[in-house]
Image (cartoon, grey):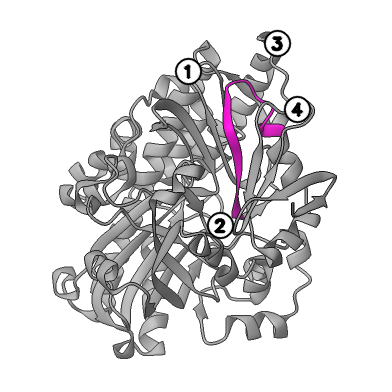
Amino acid sequence: MDTEIIQGYNLVREGVNKWRIPKLGKMRVDAVVYVNDALKSLLYEDQSLRQLVNAATLPGVVEPVIGMPDIHEGFGLPIGGVMAIDKHGVISAGAVGYDINCGVRLLRTDLEARDLSKEILYKLIERIEHYVPTGIGKKGKHKGITRRIFDDVVHNGVEAVIRAGFGSREELDYIEEGGRLAGADISAVSKEAQERGEEQLGTLGGGNHFIEIQRVDRILDKKLAEAFGLFEGQIAVMIHTGSRGFGHQIATDYTKILWEAAKKYGIDVPEKGLAAAPIDSKEGKSYYRAMAAAVNFAFSNRQIIMYDVVKAFEDVLKKPAESMGFKLVYDVAHNIAKWERHGGRDLLVHRKGATRALPAGHNQNPTSYMQTGHPALIPGSMGTGSYVVVGTDELAESFFSVNHGAGRRLSRTKAKSITKQEFEKAMGDVIYNAGSYKDIVDESPLAYKDVEEVVSVLVKRGATIPVARLVPLAVVKGVD
């Protein structure tokens, strides 16, 4: 038996790129982590395994608690963590994360990269920034509209912003959950969170959020790529952001509420980051309603940003959107908890830095992707490739979950030590909007794991099919 001890935990190899931590101590179930040998060596550097083990102690947890190939230490559940809970168990704010429904949206075009000069790319990112406020705390430019429809947005999601003029109803079939998680209730949200939300629809934020103009570099599965409207040399746009201050405030509020609730209900929660309450308790139900409101906000935020990005292209290229072939490929969430059916049971699946990937024929696929499985979007870093993949039936063992990106390997503090020369070499010819490299050095490609290694982990297990690799041409980041 192939075993290895990391951070005091015994990992047992279980086939290709899969390692199991058998339950010990207070663990109710085993934990599993999907890594190859190169990524496994990084597990010695943080506390992500301890956080997986802690999650495996929570009431109602269903085997196994999972670490994705991009796993790294977070607050509570590690980023790249998946935890499924039965109906008699708990709901945890920390197992969803602070940026509720942080997610990725991919927009395809009929434009070809060879036709866009660097001068045009510079103009495009400048015009995108004109429409989309970037950075922490920034307020949206559609406040007259978004304040008026805010209540509709949090309850009805993308449908509300489409009614207000941002896009078309056909796009709902290309968004996870149709752009709306049922059960949202604004009365479960604090006034402080509501005030932050009303001002921030249509904004990018800071940190790892981005708007990226990309070129489809390689087609890896021709049939699936055709179904998704992707071709080599094509211009695409990837948008990565979430629920902004609205979701962050909800997570902050409910981490405190659920931490106190755990004491009230006699639940042994190993750390505040996993603050949890029974799903059917007053506090648990309230958190779900508030979280769903943030999920709907985030889907709507990405919808408005997409609308503004298209407008920027129209301004710069002097062409109507229809003639450029803009179409939404898909929008996936990667910080969310929602009810799904697995193994004949209804489970509340928490994904924190993990993305759902349903295979072909799965009955929860959107109509448009029933025959292929829906696209799962895996961004790398702003200087490296991103991937479109599709799940296979093998993903049933991970509750149909894949990694959400490359995953950090350096903390933001450690990344500050990257020199200008190192940063510029890593970025290559990619255009970026920041005035100084110091403004975004903590997002350097050197701060992230190798996305090629990360994506290969599940591909080699036969759990995902790579469809296309995209590379960045120009990146809009929020400067904090």
Which residues, given as a range, are shown in magenta? 54-69
> Residue 59 appears at what percent x and percent y?
62, 20
Residue 312 placed where, x, y %?
A: 30, 70
Secondary structure state at the residue bearing disc 4: loop
Q: Quadrant of the C terminus?
A: bottom right
Given the image, on which type of amino acid does mark 4 rest? Answer: Pro
Among the two numbered marks 1 and 3 on one chain, the one whose residue lies closer to the N terminus? 3
Q: CA distance from mark 3 to mark 4?
A: 12 Å
Instruction: Return the mark for residue 285.
Output: 1
Closest to the observer, 262 or 450: 450
Residue 314 quadrant: bottom left
Mark sitting earlier along the chain (2/3): 2
Q: CA distance from mark 1 to mark 3?
A: 18 Å
- Which residue is painted at 33% across and 28% down in the image? 182
What is the C-alpha distance between the residues marked 1 and 4? 22 Å
Residue hosting label 3: 266
What is the spatial separation of the Cα atoms under label 2 and label 1, in whole angstroms? 30 Å
Amino acid type, mark 1: Lys
**Disc 1 on helix, strand or loop?**
helix
Q: In the rendered image, which quarter is residue 264 located in?
A: top right
Q: Position of residue 176 (x, y in %)?
A: 33, 45
Q: Give the residue number, with chain letter if any, for mark 2.
A: 206
Looking at numbered disc 3 in the image, what kind of residue is underneath it? Gly
- How many neighbours does mark 1 have within 10 angstroms: few (below 14), some (14-19), or many (20 or more)? some
